[in-house]
Image: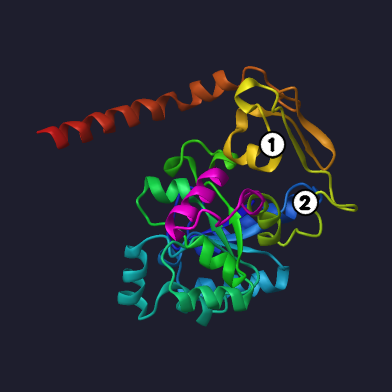
Amino acid sequence: MGILTIDFPSRYASDADDYLRQGLAARDALAADPMILFTIAPHAPYTVTDETFERIATLAEELDLPVHMHVHETEEEVERSLRVHGARPLERLDRLGLVTERLIAVHATQLLDAEIDLLARRGASVAHCPASNLKLASGIAPVVKLLDAGVGVAIGTDGAASNNRLDVLGETWLAALLAKGISHDATAVPAWQALECATLGGAKALGLAARIGSIEVGKEADLTALDLSAIENQPCYDVISQILHCAGRENVTHVWVAGTPVLLDRIVTHAENPNIADEVLRAAAPWHNQVRQRLRQAHTATTT
C-alpha cells in the first residue's frame, strides 16, 4: 500500500506533511497484518518539492520502506524539470538521496544511457507499464538496455485511467513483444525472462524476494494455476511460452496467497458480498453521469 505524497491539497490531506502523517498512521494501525505492507509513494518529481523529498528519503531509510514514484514518464516531465530545477528528474532525485535500492521508478520511458547506468549502480528498480505508456503516448521504457545493465525490471499496469484492463499477464506479453520490436531482436526478453519480471522482478523491487516471487523451499506459497486444456491452447510444446504468448487471465482457475486459497475454480473465496458489483454500479452512478456529460461536451467542442 502506498503512502501517497504530493505538495498540494485534496479532500484527503491538506499538504505533504498531512499526507505523510495520515499514511504513516495507517501503517501503524495495520502493522499487525502480515499481508499489508507499505511503500512511500510520492506521486512524481513535478508534484513534490525538494524539502518533501528530503524528508521522504530520511523516512525511507529509517523505516526501511521502498519509494514508489512515477519517474521520467514523458518528455514534457524531463523538459519541465530542466526548466524549473536545472536538472533532469533522476539527477535531481539522486542529489536528494532518493536513487537507492529502495527506489521503484515507475514508467522510466525517457532514459539516457548514463541514467540507466545510475539506476544499475544504485540498485534501483523500474516498474514497466507498457499499456499505460502506449495509451498516453508517453514513450516506451528501454527494457532490453535496462536488463542488460543489471537494472531490476518489474511489470506494472498503472491505474485504470490510463490502462483500463489492469491485466498483468497481458501486460507481460505486451512488454515482451515491445522489447523485441524496439531492439529488432526476436530473441530479446524471452518468455521465461518476461514472466520472471512479472513475478520475481516485482518481489525484488519491493524488497520481498526472500519471501515471495518464486517457488522455492522456505518461501510463501503464492501460486497461480492456469488451465491450458482448451483447444486454443493445444498443442502445448513449451508451457512457459504458452502461458505468455497464448494463455490469458481467462485461463486462471486457482490462486493461493501465502498458501491460502483466494480463487478456487474461478470463484473468489473471500468475497463477502455476492452482489458487490451492483453496489459498485450504484455508487458510481453520479460519477458516471458527470463523465458522460463531459464526454459529450468534449465531443461537441471537437466537432464544431
Picture layout, residue 232 above or below residue 294: above
Q: Residue 274 occupies which quadrant of the picture? A: top right
Q: Which residue is mark 1?
A: 237
Q: How is the image coloured?
A: rainbow
Q: Nearer the viewer, residue 10 or 258?
A: 258
Q: Residues within 10 Å of mark 2 (few under 14, many from 20)?
A: some
Position of residue 112 relative to residue 263, above or below, is: below
- Does residue 158 sit above or below 99 in this rendering? above
Toward the left, the furthest residue is 304
* Side of 162 relative to 234 (left or right): left
Residue 257 in the image: state x and y as whole percent.
78, 40
For the residues marked 2 and 1, what is the alpha-carbon distance in whole angstroms? 22 Å
Q: What residue would you read off at disc 2?
A: 214
Discs 2/1, front? 1
- Which region shows up in magenta? 171-195
* Residue 183 highlighted magenta (yes or no): yes
